[in-house]
Amino acid sequence: MRMENKKELSPEQRLALLSTLKDRFERNINRHKGLEWAKVEARLEASRNFGIEKLWSLHEMERTGGEPDVVRYDEKTGEYLFYDCSAESPKGRRSVCYDREALESRKEHKPATSATDMAAAMGIELLTEEQYRALQQLGNFDTKTSSWVKTPSEIRKLGGAIFADFRYGNVFVYHNGAESYYAARAFRGLLRV
């Protein structure tokens, strides 16, 4: 699970990513009714001009299997929200424990990294339980896998972390020790643009 150190894309990578994002946007109109790709793209280009490399973060989401797509426009902040919309939890982010504290607490068989460390390196946030439930309103995600979600501090202080999936027509939210990790669990991220 190599993370790029250079947080910029070549012109070819930029064009390829924008093409992929536009195609996904157009194929999944139900995720963002009333939004226009031209405005999303303009916002992405504007973020580049201010030195905020949102396209690099989207590239990392794509590279690790997240299939990012716009899910809404936040009227209060004026931001477009991209969520990982891959059918299953992103393959390139699996087998990670919840956070750095959990990773350091493992005595043996440590995973390569943690969900929170990986998200921070990618410049994205973990979905909250509320955001995960909102995502599930747009389709059925994680029917064979599960995803870590942002864990409330009161649960994390007790050594736990929460994850969610979709089974039997319902979203289920469960708990595990934060140091646990599984081949079928990753995390879903959010990027604000």
Image (cartoon, rainbow, N blue to C red):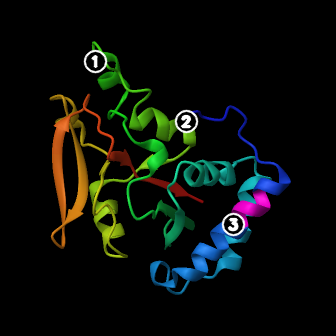
Res 39 → quadrant: bottom right
Q: Is residue 66 left or right of residue 162?
A: right
Res 48 → quadrant: bottom right
Res 62 → quadrant: bottom right
Q: What's drawn in magenta, residue-wise?
A: 14-18
Q: Which mark is residue 43?
A: 3
Image quadrant for the C terminus? Answer: bottom right
Residue 92, image x and y in percent? 49, 45
Q: Residue at x 66, y 67 (%)?
A: 20
Question: What is the three-letter code of the residue carrying label 2?
Answer: Ala
Q: Nearer the viewer, mark 1 or mark 2?
A: 1
Q: Nearer the viewer, residue 9 or 46?
A: 9
Q: Nearer the viewer, mark 2 or mark 3?
A: 2
Q: Nearer the viewer, mark 3 or mark 1?
A: 1
Residue 16, image x and y in percent? 75, 62
Badge 3 density bin: few <14, some 14–19, many ≥20, Cα 10 Å: some
Q: Residue at x 77, y 54 (%)?
A: 13
Q: Is residue 129 left or right of residue 38?
A: left
Q: Residue at x 58, y 73 (%)?
A: 24
Q: Nearer the viewer, residue 109 or 141?
A: 109
Question: What is the three-letter code of the residue carrying label 1?
Answer: Arg
Identify the residue position indicated by label 1 in the image. 106
Residue 29's place in the image compared with 162, above or below, is: below
Q: Which badge, 2 or 3, comes first in the chain's sequence?
A: 3
Identify the residue position indicated by label 2 in the image. 121
Q: Which badge, 3 or 1, comes first in the chain's sequence?
A: 3
Badge 1 density bin: few <14, some 14–19, many ≥20, Cα 10 Å: few
Q: CA distance from mark 1 to mark 2?
A: 21 Å
SS under mark 2:
helix
SS under mark 1:
loop
Residue 41, image x and y in percent? 70, 70
